[in-house]
């Protein structure tokens, strides 16, 4: 349900959630656009459903950005625009806690901006940012990128920087972080 109030950031493990990720034309949430959105719905710690779509940003994707995520202008030429895709994403995530890596500072800004612009309100879902959790519960790591965390837990990083692959990777990372959070202790792994 869309409203005027953002959800709260949680610093805990919840067993029912939707992990999501965006790929964009750049890192500026004021001028760049979404080119891919994916989400994985998890109930009781188990993957139940996936959602993924390329998005036509109605502008060109720069060569440098395309090299990062591998999405080209040709790939999105016939994709739906974000106003159509975002509505499906909002329905898919309704009532669920959102989980993602660096979503507080990046992904949610695009979601809030475009939800307000297209529909006049924003999703009020509570959310968990795995970057913040990792910094809190894995302070021994020098870096806390999603791929570093995946490697730390022995999770494949193949296909990183495509939204659905990053969702699958982050879902596994979040489950591992959940074990640490629920035990209230530091993991026995070393990096």
Image (cartoon, rainbow, N blue to C red):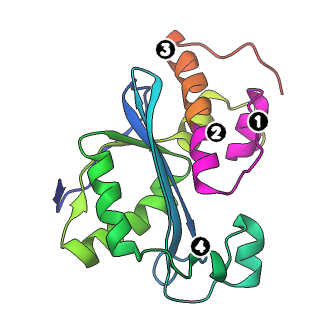
Quarter of the image holding residue 187?
Answer: top right
User: Residue pushed farthest right?
Assistant: 191
- Which comes sooner in the sequence, label 1 or label 3? 1
Q: Residue at x 68, y 77 (%)?
A: 72
Which residue is at the front of the view, 131 or 169? 169
Mark 4 touches mark 1? (CB < 8 Å): no
Determine whether 5 is above or below 136 in the image: below
| Observer able to see residue 136 | no
Say which residue label 3 marks: 182
Q: Can residue 31 be found in the magenta stretch?
A: no
- Which comes sooner in the sequence, label 4 or label 2? 4
Numbered disc in front, either 4 or 1 = 1
- Which comes sooner in the sequence, label 4 or label 1? 4
Numbered disc in front, either 2 or 3 = 2
Say which residue label 1 marks: 156
Q: Residue at x 76, y 42 (%)?
A: 157
Say which residue label 2 marks: 169
> Label 4: few (<14), some or many (≥20) within 10 Å?
some
Residue 52: x percent and y percent? 49, 55
Real-space Cα distance between discs 1 and 3? 24 Å
Residue at disc 4, secondary structure: loop
Residue 188: x percent and y percent? 74, 12
Determine whether 104 is above or below 113 in the image: above
Which residue is at the front of the view, 138 or 126? 126
């Amino acid at each position: 349900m869309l409203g005027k109030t953002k959800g709260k950031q949680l610093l805990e493990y919840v067993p029912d959630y939707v992990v999501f990720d965006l790929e964009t034309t750049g890192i500026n949430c004021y001028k760049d656009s979404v080119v891919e959105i994916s989400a994985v719905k998890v109930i009781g710690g188990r993957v139940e459903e996936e959602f993924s779509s390329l998005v036509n940003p109605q502008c060109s994707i720069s060569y440098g950005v395309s090299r990062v995520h591998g999405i080209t202008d040709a790939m999105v030429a016939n994709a739906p625009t974000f106003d159509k895709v975002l509505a499906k994403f909002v329905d898919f995530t309704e009532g669920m806690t959102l989980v993602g890596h660096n979503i507080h500072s990046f992904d949610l800004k695009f979601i809030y901006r475009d939800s307000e612009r297209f529909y006049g309100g924003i999703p009020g879902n509570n959310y968990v940012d795995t970057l913040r959790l990792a910094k809190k519960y894995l302070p021994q790591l020098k870096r806390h990128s999603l791929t570093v965390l995946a490697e730390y837990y022995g999770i494949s990083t193949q296909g990183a920087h495509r939204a659905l692959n990053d969702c699958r990777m982050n879902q596994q990372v979040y489950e591992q972080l959940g074990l640490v959070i629920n035990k209230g202790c530091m993991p026995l792994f070393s990096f």
